Image (cartoon, rainbow, N blue to C red):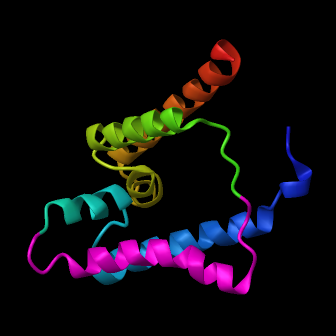
Amino acid sequence: MIDWTNFTPWQSLAGGLLIGIASAMFVLLNGRIAGISGILGGLLRPVSGDIGWRIAFIAGLLAAPLAYGLVAPLPSVRIDADTASLVAAGLLVGIGTRYGSGCTSGHGVCGLSRLSPRSLVATAAFMLAGFATVFIIRHLIG
């Protein structure tokens, strides 16, 4: 069921276009994939001369909502889960990105746009896992 009062197709389209353009510019100008887990992981195993752009990228991710909040109201955040569930979910996602050699941004955005078969399989796997998790949590566990 669609929540028509909060349905934002134009804003969603604009956000998707911005992500696509930014990812394309990043790979064309820097020769790097904008996969967040790989960028953050590179900070955990620093290589000389490779740290600055990674810090700038992560800082931009953190600063963007703050900058947006200066010109428009930030949407309200509502999380229907307890802290333990969020921690478990975060750990499972982190483990999944290590096993899948990438995350949704690396495989789903950048990999699919490059027609990578490995990214197609990875994206299908995490989408199916997400669908199954929602079904199990909402309909079987309750």
Q: On screen, 29 above or below 126?
A: below
Q: Is residue 124 visible?
A: no
Q: From this viewpoint, which residue is outermost toward the front?
A: 83
Q: Position of residue 21 (x, y in %)?
A: 52, 76
Measuring 35% from the left and 74% from the top, which residue is drawn there? Answer: 27
Q: Position of residue 33 (x, y in %)?
A: 33, 66
Q: Was residue 74 drawn as part of the magenta stretch in this picture? A: yes
Res. 18 image quadrant: bottom right
Which residue occupies the foreground of this view, 88 or 137? 88
For this view, does 68 lie left or right of residue 29?
Answer: right
The chief SS type of the magenta part is: helix
Q: On screen, 28 above or below 33?
A: below
Q: Is residue 98 visible?
A: yes
Q: Position of residue 100 (x, y in %)?
A: 31, 40
Q: From this viewpoint, which residue is outermost toward the top?
A: 140
- Residue range highlighted in magenta: 47-76
Measuring 45% from the left and 42% from the top, which residue is drawn there? Answer: 123
Q: Position of residue 78 (x, y in %)?
A: 70, 49
How many numbered callouts?
0
Q: Was residue 115 drawn as part of the magenta stretch in this picture? A: no
For this view, does 108 lie left or right of residue 3?
Answer: left
For this view, does 114 lie left or right of residue 10?
Answer: left
Measuring 58% from the left and 78% from the top, which residue is drawn there? Answer: 66
Q: On screen, 90 above or below 20?
A: above
For this view, does 111 lie left or right of residue 63?
Answer: left
